[in-house]
Image: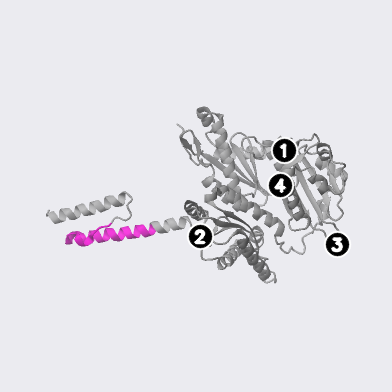
Amino acid sequence: MNESYRLGEQSIIAYLQRLANGISTAELDVAALPAELRAVGEQLQKTHAILQQERRLLESNAYIDPLTNLGNRGGLDRHVEQLWHKGDPFTCAYIDIDHLKHCNDRFGHAEGNRYILSICSTLSETMEHDEMLFRIGGDEFVLISLSANETELEQRLERVRAGLIEASSSGKAPMIASFSFGCSRVDPLAGDTRRQMTMDADRKMYRYKLMHRVQQPKDNDAPQRPIVDQLPCNDRVFQAISMSSETRYPFILNLDTGESQWSVNAVRDFDLPSQHPFNSLDMWLARVHPEDRDNVRAELDMVINGTWHFHYMQYRVMDATGKYVLCDCTGYRLDGTDTEPSMYVGTIINRSLADTTDSVTGLGDVHALVNAIGEMRRVAREAGFIAIKVDDIAEVNARFGFDAGDRVLAESAACLMDCSRGKGRLFRSTGPMFVALFDELGPEAIDELANEIERFLGSPVLIGSLEYQPPIRVATLHLNSVDRQPVSILNELKALLGKAVQVPGTKLD
């Protein structure tokens, strides 16, 4: 073997070793090889080029939604990570297509896909050069803009939505096309967090949907129920509702006359003048903590004048003892007709009396879960369940203490809230088991959300010097009608979790 051939072989071996070590920029000087080795060198270069191309294609597909060719959730996470690393402020819009389930159920999934693509195309046509659109779920998009502020992006999306509704309202389209949205401006260098961004945009989008969601034309033969049938029909029914829980106070306010109705519990616990007071908004605002009063008044004014149809706030209210207690206040405006008044109907939860909240995670506990399933059973509603079990909590408690185990569960609950994005009600059932309850999602959407939970649930928790990733199990259950006792459903969920494949985490042994 001559010296030139031996050096050529060494060059090829060194080239292959660099490739094996992950050095994708490794080069081989084929022209410097002896004639008898050049064909081998050229073939190695061609093979490397093909493999590099396939690798880039696989990496690209991992971040691309196959239906729309937009970035998917992974692509969004990567893009936001880059912006966060640079410290660039930006505006995000969370966009949710209205009535996609109605479209799929009534016209089929092919028409549903066309509906998704039409929204995607319309949004893309209005984007600026520095903006990117991502599809992160079946009916969910996120638009990221570096230049538009929150108001500018809201105004543009409002114009796009109005154009969609006008174009599809002639009766030629299968259904009226529309979407709901919420915008949030974030500045990483100012201390904003991604969780704050997600929660803020999601909250605004949900509120927008409640205020503006377009109603699709109903079938002519579908029985219509007047709004009045959905209200308590007399004092006896109202009292039965109000006495069902000491922590909840339902109320009804006639916005046309100012007359209102409150529960006996509310009269007792907040020292109200009667069950049927007039000027009840002023009466209630007088009991709100002075530091919270202006914000509460501003939101309620928006409900009264019809700008908002949904109100949710958590604030402090003075009780009958003169102490301020934390309350969750939720209400809906029902617009009036020629024969019916405009109503504001809601519920107040007194957190100082609440006994159905898990102290570790802040989610509803098993009692709240049983009550929620029982409510759905009484009206025989469709329901979807996602059960999640965090494994190895007993080992974490034994090795690091119960505070560490509680931190793992609390972080898992926070991550579960991010994944569910307000679409369902979340509970800590028993021990390390969580249950998410949905009443507007079909089996496919439930499975898709469960897959997302498997990928993202369980953010690493720092326990001492150990970055611990909890192993989890996820199971789903869909019922066309809740026709069983809650305990039977919970037992079935436990059995499904026992059969579920574990998503591995950090090994403690």
The amino acid beneath tag 3 is Asp
257 up-or-down from 388: above or below: below
| Residue 334 placement (x, y as % from top left) | 79, 55
Q: Is residue 463 left or right of residue 342?
A: left
The amino acid beneath tag 4 is Met
Residue at 57% x, 44% y: name it.
415
Q: Residues within 10 Å of mark 1 (few under 14, many from 20)?
A: some
How far apart in space, not on screen, are marks 1 and 3 (Cα)?
A: 39 Å
Helix, strand or loop at label 2? It is loop
Q: How many marks?
A: 4
Nearer the observer: mark 3 or 2; the answer is 3
Q: Residues within 10 Å of mark 2 (few under 14, many from 20)?
A: few
Say which mark, if any, is on residue 66: 2
How far apart in space, not on screen, are marks 1 and 2 (Cα)?
A: 46 Å
Nearer the observer: mark 1 or 3; the answer is 1
Q: Which residue is mark 4?
A: 313
Helix, strand or loop at label 3? It is loop
Q: Which residue is mark 1?
A: 351
| Residue 99 placement (x, y as % from top left) | 66, 59
Residue found at the very far front of the displayed protein: 290
Find the magenta span and give its range.
27-54
Which one is nearer the viewer's eye here, 407 or 147?
147
Say which mark, if any, is on residue 338: 3
